[in-house]
Amino acid sequence: MTPPKKLVIASRESALAMWQARHIQSLLQALYPNTQVEILGMTTTGDQILDSPLSRIGGKGLFVKELEQALADGSADLAVHSMKDVPMNMPEGFMLAATGEREDPRDAFVSNDYKTLEDLPAGSVVGTSSLRRQSQLMARFPHLKIESLRGNLQTRLRKLDEGQYAAIILAAAGLIRLGLESRIANLIAPDKSIPAVGQGALGIEICTGRDDLLALLAPLNHPETEACVLAERATSRALAGSCTVPLGAYATISDNLLNITGFVASVDGKKIVRAQVQGSPQQAEIIGQQLAAAMVAQGADKILAALEH
C-alpha cells in the first residue's frame, strides 16, 4: 500500500467538528508523513437551522448530508463525524471505515450556580436539545422545566452565561475535547442518564469501493469502541431510533464481555422501559438486537407507536 500524495477530510465548521477533523488529520500525518492531509470545512443544514428542535427538522442526517456530497463528488476522501450524529442506516454508497477511541461518553451537568441536578430548585429551567436527555430528566425531576437548546457548544454556553437557563446538559466529550472541562459542574452517571448511541466516539466515513482508504484508515480503528458502538447502533436500528425517539443505549467491555444497557421512554418520562444484556464482543450487533427485543418485550414498541401519533 502506497499512501497517496494528498487526502482531504470533509468536516462541519463548528469548533468541535474542526477539533475532531484536526485530531484525525494529525493522526494521519503521523502515520503517513509524506501525505498532505487537508481539511475541507463545510456548513451543513443542521448548522444553519437553529430555531427548531432537531427532531422537527429532519434529525441527525442534517449534519452529514453535505459532507457525503463532498465524498460523492470527489472533493473529499473521508468525512469525520461524531458517531452520535451518524444516522443508524448508512445511505447507499457510503460506509464507516473506522471508529476512533471513545472519549468520556457521559452527559455533563453544566451550571454556574448549582453543583448537581439534585440541587436545582423547582421550576428551574434546564436546556437540552435531546429528547433522550429530556425524557430521563423529566422521569427523575418532574419539578424542573426542560427547554430546547440548539446551537454549537459555544452558543449553548453563552446562553447559559446570559442567564437563559439555570443549567444545561451537554455531552462531556465535546467539552473535554475543546479544553472546556472546567465548565463541567458534575458528570452524570450512565445509569442515571443513559448516553446517546455512539456518544463520545468519532466515525470516519468514506465512499464504498474505496478499498485503498480502508487499508489506510485501519490503524485509526479502535476495536473495543467499534464493538460497543456497533451494539448500540444495532439496538437503535432495531427500534427505528432517530432524533424523534427518546432512546439511549450504552455498551462497555470488561473481561471480554460486552455489557449493554438501553432505554426507551415517552417524551414526558412518565413511561420508561429499561433493559440490560451481555455477551461476546464478537457478537456485538446480535447483542444490540437482543437488547431491543428485551425492551419490546417490556412494551417499548407501544411507547414508540404512541410517539408517532
Image (tube, grey):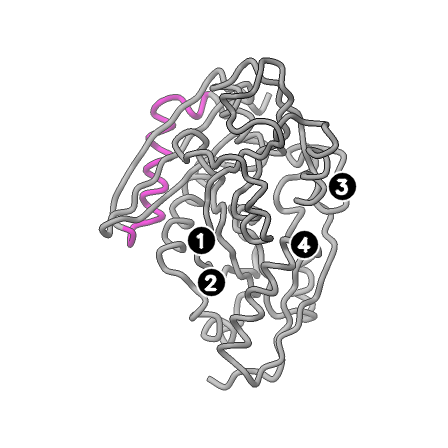
Q: Is the magenta region chiefly helix, strand or loop?
A: helix
Q: Amino acid at mark 1?
A: Arg
**In the figure, residue 146 lies in which quadrant?**
top right
Q: Where in the figure is residue 142, as x and y percent of width and height?
A: 53, 15
Q: Earlier in the sequence, mark 4 or mark 3?
A: 4
Q: Which residue is mark 3?
A: 49
SS category of the residue bearing label 3: loop
**Residue for point 34% across, 25% down:** 297
Q: Where in the figure is residue 307, as x and y percent of width and height?
A: 56, 23
In the rendered view, tell whether residue 8 sits above or below residue 92.
below
Q: Which residue is mark 1?
A: 102
Left or right for 122, reference 158: left
Residues packed near mark 3 inside 10 Å, few (<14), some (14 to 19) or many (20 plus)? some
Q: Where in the figure is residue 137, as x and y percent of width and height?
A: 52, 24
Q: Amino acid at mark 2?
A: Ala
> Label 2 vs label 4: CA separation?
22 Å
SS category of the residue bearing label 2: strand
**Which segment did they paint magenta?**
281-302
Q: Which residue is mark 4?
A: 15
**Residue for point 63% across, 53% down:** 16
Q: Earlier in the sequence, mark 2 or mark 3?
A: 3
Q: Where in the figure is residue 239, as x and y percent of width and height?
A: 45, 35
Residues packed near mark 2 inside 10 Å, few (<14), some (14 to 19) or many (20 plus)? many
